[in-house]
Image (spheres, grey):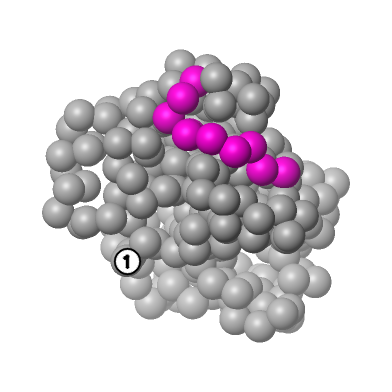
Amino acid sequence: MRFVIIGAGRVGLRTARVLREEGHEVTIIERDDAMVRRARNQEFTVVEGDGSQESVLEEAGIKEADALGALTGDLNVNFTASMIAKHHGCRTVMRIDEAYREGIYRKYAEEVDEIIYPERLGAIGAKNALLGGTIRAIADIAPHLQVVELTLTQEAPINGYTISELELPADATVLAFGKRDDPLEIPSADESLETGDRLVVLADYEVLSQVRQLIVGETANQAMANAGAGGVN
């Protein structure tokens, strides 16, 4: 997938690194000279300029991008860039810095797909918001371990099973379970698994593709490609 990230600060650059490590194409927009140099030193493609300007966004490839992350500390830049990106058909993720403003921006920026603030959501969370979908990474516990939240689909082989009937690979375990729209809880053995339910799983990267096949219903080839790249989509 192709992403445009506005802002090469702490949140923006970390998000860009996570996306690149998972095999995605990332272009960064930044207007601060020092931050531009830092991003280029890390071998990112960087467009210098104001991310709220349509011409700069077009130079960064917004017309071909799948999603835009407006992750600067400037609310006006983030808001304007998100509106322009939405016009070009992108998924949009907008950063705000104060939690109390979230309701205001959700009310007046209804077209923005996700609103995040770093105090609650770091680089992994920003990446999940950009990707959307039925699988999201929660944390990398170790180089070979990841905690993921997966949403059951209609195609999942385990749809209709109970927790006690669920057989995950040896190097994966269920940590929490939540019915559709309900809070996550410690799972009980007789809980039924239905479309829209969520499972939080701790898994070794080696078995992530098998876990994805069981819970999300991906084909073997899809799961192998996505898990192999660390993909969460």
Residue that badge 1 annotates: 119
85 versus 214 height, above or below: above
Q: Amino acid at mark 1?
A: Glu
Q: Nearer the viewer, residue 104 or 160?
A: 104
On the image, the x and y values in percent for residue 4 come to: 59, 38
Q: Residue at x 56, y 26 (%)?
A: 56
> Residue 80 appears in which quarter of the rendering?
top left
Q: Could you tell whether 101 is left or right of 113 in the image?
A: left
Query: Looking at the image, can residue 132 be seen?
Result: no
Where residue 169 sits, quadrant-wise, is: bottom right
Query: Percent from the top left, x then y, of residue 117?
Result: 33, 56
Residue at x-position 64% and y-position 30%: 60
Between 134 and 11, the one lying in front of the other is: 11
Instruction: Check disc 1 and report its element: helix, strand or loop.
Output: loop
Q: Residue at x 44, y 48 (%)?
A: 71
Q: Please name whichever residue, 160 or 181, is drawn nearer the observer in this view of the structure.
A: 181
Residue 74 % position (x, y): 33, 45
Residue 70: tell me if it is visible: yes
Task: Spot the residue most to the top.
Answer: 87
Q: Is residue 10 above or below residue 83?
A: below
For the N terminus, which image quadrant?
A: top right
In this picture, residue 47 sits left or right of residue 224: left
The outermost residue toward the front is 33
Q: Any magenta on residue 59?
A: no
Lateral position of residue 57 relative to residue 171, left or right: left
Name the spot of residue 28 as percent of width and height, x first. 61, 43
Task: Specify start and end residues of the magenta stretch as a single range.
Answer: 45-54
**Identity of the residue drawn at 30% across and 36% down:** 76
Is 185 left or right of 224, judged from the image as shown? left
Q: Quadrant of residue 42?
A: bottom right
Q: Is residue 30 above or below residue 229?
A: above
